[in-house]
Amino acid sequence: MGFQIPVLWVLANLSALVWASLLPEQMAHDLQSLISPDSDIEVVGSNQTWPSGFTPRWAITAPPKYIMVIKPRLVTDVQAIIRYASTNDVPFLATGGGHGYSSTLGGLEEGISIDMGYFDEITVNTASNTMTTGGAVKTADIVDALHAVGREIPVGQCICIGYSGATLGGGIGPYSGLHGTQSDSLLSVQMVNGRGDIVTVSKNQNRDLFYGIKGAGANFGVVTSLTYRVYPATNGGMAMNADMMFPGALNGSVWELARSFAGNQPKELSITFSISYNATIGDIVLIANFIYAGPQARGRRLIKPFLDLGPINLSITTVTWSDLPRVAVYGLPYAGCRGGSLYVPQSLNLYRIDVANIASVVNYMKRRMAAEPSLQSLFVAWAQYSQYGFAKFSDDSSAFPHRDAVAFVQIDGFAMDPSQVSSVNEFGKEIRDRFQRGSGRRDLSVYVNFAHGDEPAKAWYSSRKLPKLRELKRRYDPNSSFSFYNPIL
Ligand SMILES: Cc1cc2nc3c(=O)[nH]c(=O)nc-3n(C[C@H](O)[C@H](O)[C@H](O)COP(=O)(O)OP(=O)(O)OC[C@H]3O[C@@H](n4cnc5c(N)ncnc54)[C@H](O)[C@@H]3O)c2cc1C
Ligand SMILES: *[C@@H]1O[C@H](CO)[C@@H](O)[C@H](O)[C@H]1NC(C)=O
Ligand SMILES: *[C@@H]1O[C@H](CO)[C@@H](O)[C@H](O)[C@H]1NC(C)=O
Ligand SMILES: *[C@@H]1O[C@H](CO)[C@@H](O)[C@H](O)[C@H]1NC(C)=O
Ligand SMILES: *[C@@H]1O[C@H](CO)[C@@H](O)[C@H](O)[C@H]1NC(C)=O
Ligand SMILES: *[C@@H]1O[C@H](CO)[C@@H](O)[C@H](O)[C@H]1NC(C)=O
């Protein structure tokens, strides 16, 4: 317990006179008496120095600003914090893995972080093929726990993120080709909703909220426990990982092959491309990653057309399912777990692979990046999963609206210092807009967990789902307390 009252006690009492805004020390004192004794509370100084023992934020240009961090132990503690904060009109935000990066998070000022760090348990039941987790488990812990007992579930490509946080927005990764989104595997959820009520949400209880939680979940409350279906490990828990590099000059041929897989990609095969600029050679370099949940020999046959193009670097290995996120794409996403930089993201979905359009985007990138060194750390990555897993669940089963996307594109800009943020962002946005022209859709569509944060809500949730989600929002979060992460309203 880090909280101490002494000197500030006087100030705290004084604040009773200044009724309009409670002092943080007063609030900490109030809250301390409302929650269980081994919860942690720390007041955060105006310099936002992060107290140790609390979950930091990964990388973001406009972070949420806190006056206090609280790490509750019990579901009733979460409820007490939400009720206290709502009554006193203090903004708050749940923190799971701390890897959310939407610019909307910067809208939270003088708020409370409800750090879910103590909700980190993972229980796997192999008899029923289910897993129950706390609201702040990390993907890394999920993969290790499941692999140890011969089970699997879809996970994202970066294992340092919060598994629950990702699930609330859908959660997509290589095994989505087999099993859909992370949220498609949800069986039930315990949460404290925006009314401050502790509720169980499932197919049978609060069914409408269950729909909303799966894809728009950050909008309705704090999730304390999640139960998922898990699956027997495909191919005995082993998979092929193939990484290869191509020179920019081959980009057209690479996209031709990518197009040939779109729509008929085997469910066991996931493909990721990345497009970056190498300043030493002054050229675009492509990396292609193939994960195949099957025997390596069959995987090699599937990707033979890419091998026949003559990659300049090739690495094919067979690894455990749990190690895939650590080794895939030459281990670069795993290295990206470090964080701490000024991340400037843009994203969009593609509904077809338009070879000529993508080649023209690559040419544009090369031209701009050759001329402007401050843009050279940006890279574009896209995940092309089989649609088999997504199509197993109907569009109206959840708020996740992107079952028919062919590729989820991420435009990952990094600014070396704050003065570069806006130029890197403009570049990223221009790349996004150029991709959009060949996306196969008139309107922009963006996976909510990859969003910059300035897109319209219909890009994240779709026009067809927004009316229902807005109604759910009015019902379960009437004060719009949960509106700092790509909000519905
Ligand atoms: C390097 C990197 C790689 C990524 N790769 C993938 C990927 O392959 N696939 C994919 O799907 N996503 C991916 N993501 C995106 C990721 O899904 C989001 O960043 C997600 O928001 C992370 O959740 P978190 O709990 O770590 O973050 P947080 O910042 O803690 O949470 C994000 C939002 O969710 C809310 N939230 C978190 N936990 C809870 C809870 N228990 N109850 C209620 N609300 C909660 C928070 O309040 C916040 O609004 C990646 C992100 C990064 C940084
Ligand atoms: C930031 O504020 C905290 C608490 O107010 C203080 O202890 C710490 O020394 C400050 N750090 C810096 C770098 O100013
Ligand atoms: C909504 O806000 C009002 C005013 O701040 C507060 O009195 C009320 O308790 C809040 N309602 C909920 C459900 O949190
Ligand atoms: C990308 O491919 C196209 C079509 O094959 C080619 O004309 C172009 O030069 C390539 N771009 C780069 C940067 O090499
Ligand atoms: C750029 O290319 C050079 C020459 O092939 C290579 O040595 C270097 O590692 C590359 N840089 C990056 C960041 O990949
Ligand atoms: C392939 O690239 C990886 C990562 O950059 C590097 O470690 C490896 O040495 C390269 N292999 C060859 C044969 O060039």
Image (spheres, helix red, strand yellow):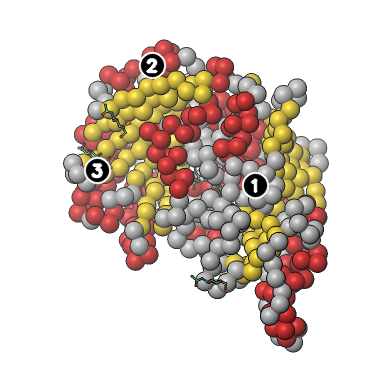
Label 1 sits on residue: 136
> Relative to 374, does residue 30 appear above or below in the rendering?
below
Using the rendered view, name the quadrant where residue 166 is placed.
Answer: top right
Task: Pick out the residue farthest to the top.
Answer: 297
Could you tell me the amino acid type at mark 3? Answer: Asn
- Contact between marks 3 and 1 (CB within 8 A): the answer is no
Closer to the camera in the image, 165 or 363: 165
Q: Position of residue 178 (x, y in %)?
A: 56, 25
Residue at x 45%, y 51% (from the top left corner): 339
When asked about the image quadrant of residue 424, the answer is: bottom left
Q: Secondary structure at mark 3?
A: strand
Residue 382 in the image: above or below residue 301:
below
> Residue drawn at (37%, 64%), measured in percent from left and top?
418
**Residue named by callout 2:** 300
Under mark 1, the amino acid is: Ala
Residue hosting label 3: 278
Please tell me how crowded label 3 is: few (under 14), some (14-19), or many (20+) other residues with Cα within 10 Å: some
Residue drawn at point x = 74 percent, y = 38 percent: 188
